[in-house]
Amino acid sequence: MTPSKQKPIKKPKVGIYGFTGCAGDQLLIIHTEDELLNLFDAVDVRSFVMASSKPIEDDLDVALIEGSISTEEEEKHIKEIRKRTKIMVAIGNCAVCGGPQAMSTGDGKYEERLNMVYGPAKFDVQPIEARPIDAVVTVDYYLPGCSISQPQTIALLSRLIHGVAPEPFPHPVCHECKLNENRCLLLDKKFCLGPLTLGGCGAACPTHNLPCVGCWGPNPDGNFKSHFDLLQSFGFSKEEITRRIRSFGGHKILEHIKDL
Amino acid sequence: MVDSKQITIEPLARVEGHGGISVDIKNNKIANVKVDILEGPRLFEALVLGKTDRKSVV
């Protein structure tokens, strides 16, 4: 009997890129030791400069992008990657929301800050105000977090490798906090942003008695007005709440709080 | 034995951040080494102004 000729399943071509950020999300992918070999076996990594010296820049099936767009060159580069990848995933708070560097984006004082930090320095590459990548290109999927979480990352990549859309995770931090049976920190009038923040972190901080700082970015389903009122009833001023929620809310949070 | 050559390593891989190295060789001697580390501006120095250590960023 002649053996049937099986068409080998083509491994998806993956590129992992970093823009302006700490590179922690790229590093986390490398730190998935339990799954790393399986991951590199299941995909064809074309470009991942943190892991390999020989990047190949051609067509991709999936591009994972970390970091905010903070220079003109980065704006060009992300558009160039978008043209040659089927799927683009924003990974990490900087790519998803703009990151801490975007906490003052839009206040009109960018040039002032730039001058304060760099003075009369001449730039080889022109800096621009930090923005999430979806301010420049269309993003297909998001993997928020600062840094991204290992289980959530592997789950998303597994789905993409099998050609299926990743499972959305539209739950706030409170959901995971409750699953851990934590006492709610809001009962003690702590400044916790859990209800307004996307989950996926396993409510790591509240589980260790630290109020959530919102590093997974805004929960689009959150009741922003109600939570602002609650925090103000604890004695926090609106300015303080806005400042602190923008630390990781970055640029993306503005659409949720602009009418408050 | 190399009279004149330029060696460029771009990008500098397997490190955190973005970088490149360029080495100029003239008359078999290294004439110049340039290391380019490009990190996008985050301006934390300006973002933390006016905040105490407790109420710094978060």
Image (cartoon, coloured by chain):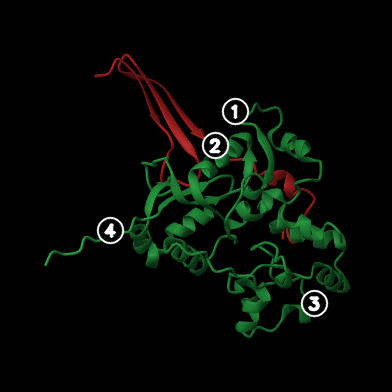
| Marks 3 and 1, the one that precedes in the sequence | 1
Q: Are marks 2 and 3 on the same chain?
A: no
| Mark 4 touches mark 3? (CB < 8 Å) | no
Q: Nearer the viewer, residue A225 or A20?
A: A225
| Mark 1 touches mark 2? (CB < 8 Å) | yes
**What residue does disc 1 label?**
A124
Residue at image location 65% in from the left, 78% down from the top = A175
**What residue does disc 4 label?**
A7
Q: Is residue A202 above or below residue A126?
A: below
Spatial separation of the CA atoms under disc 4 and disc 1: 49 Å
Spatial separation of the CA atoms under disc 3 and disc 1: 48 Å
The mark found on residue B38 in the picture is 2
Q: Are marks 4 and 3 on the same chain?
A: yes
| Mark 4 touches mark 1? (CB < 8 Å) | no
User: As shown in the figure, which amino acid type bears the numbered disc 4?
Assistant: Lys
Q: Colour of chain A?
A: green
Spatial separation of the CA atoms under disc 4 and disc 3: 61 Å
**What residue does disc 3 label?**
A189
Choose mark 2 or mark 4, whichever is in front: 4
Q: Nearer the viewer, residue A163 or A247?
A: A163
Q: To which chain does the residue with label 3 belong?
A: A
Spatial separation of the CA atoms under disc 2 and disc 4: 44 Å
Drawn side of residue A257 relative to residue B13, left or right: right
How packed mark 3 is, by other alpha carbons closer than 10 Å (few <14, some 14-19, many 20 or more), is some
